[in-house]
Amino acid sequence: MDSTLSGTDLLIRMKNGDEQAFAAVYHQYHPSLYVFMLRYCKVPSLAEDLVHDVFLKVWEIRDRIQPELPFAGYLYRIARNHAFKTLQRAATDRSLREQILAQLNIAPEAGNPEQLIKSKEYDRLFHEALNQMPPQRLNVFRLCRQEGRTYDEAAEILGISRNAVKKHMVLGMRFIHNYIFRYGGISLAIAFHLKNYFPDGVPSL
């Protein structure tokens, strides 16, 4: 393979099934993508597995690559989506959850994850997320999640419909989850799951 090829030329060749071009792309982006994944999951072996998964996905869908567009942004979107899916799986996969918590020196038995939940970092990110919510959404969240009000009670207090309350709760909880994941990584987001904000995973409308 011509060692002078780079950028768009490499992407075109990879898109056309050139395995050497794929290997060159892999070696070019692997170090930075590994650091990116490690920032989120904090577990070196898991970060390496996630990077491998991402490149495998890139190869599988290489026909979708648009060589004229920035490849790094495309790659990191795939990586972030895969990290989210891993987080959701960790909420129900005991082995994966224990692997991540063990790396943080936190026992996975019932009750011990509270040590992480109560950490200053978690509290800081949680309250930062709350402070960035629209006023009405914050009111709904405080009434339903922090005061234990029902949707009907919150709707009556705020003078809005029950459906509006439900929508605010879903969007509010999702925003907090995404914020903690973005700035705190998978480990803190798992704590969010363990705290039962998402007993059935990230909610949808």
Image (tube, rainbow, N blue to C red):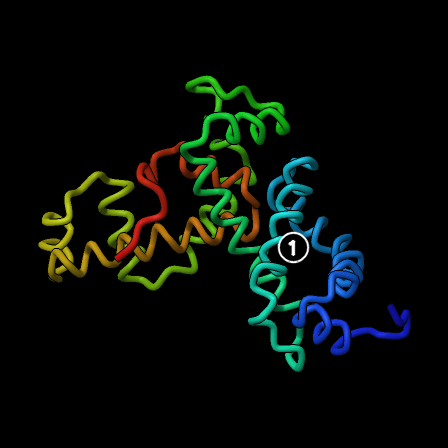
Q: Is residue 67 above or below residue 81?
A: below
Q: Residues within 10 Å of mark 1 (few under 14, many from 20)?
A: many
Residue depicted at 70% across the width and 37% down the height: 44
Residue at horizontal 56%, vertical 55%? 80
**Front-most of 108 and 144?**
108
Name which residue lies at 32% across and 57% down.
171
Q: Is residue 140 above or below residue 191?
A: below
Residue 109 place in picture, x, y as percent: 46, 17
Quadrant position of the N terminus in the picture: bottom right
Residue 200 image-quadrant placement: top left
**From the viewer's perspective, is 183 left or right of 67?**
left
Q: Nearer the viewer, residue 20 or 123?
A: 20
Quadrant of the rendered image containing residue 64: bottom right
Residue type for callout 1: Phe
Q: Is residue 10 left or right of residue 174?
A: right
Find the residue positioned furthest to the right: 3
Q: Residue at label 1?
A: 55
Name the residue nearer the viewer: 27 or 196.
Answer: 27
Question: Dividing the image into 4 quarters, which one contains the C terminus?
Answer: bottom left
Residue 146 image position (x, y, % from top left): 29, 41
Residue at position x 49%, y 49% in the image: 84
Between residue 175 and residue 84, name the one nearer to us.
84
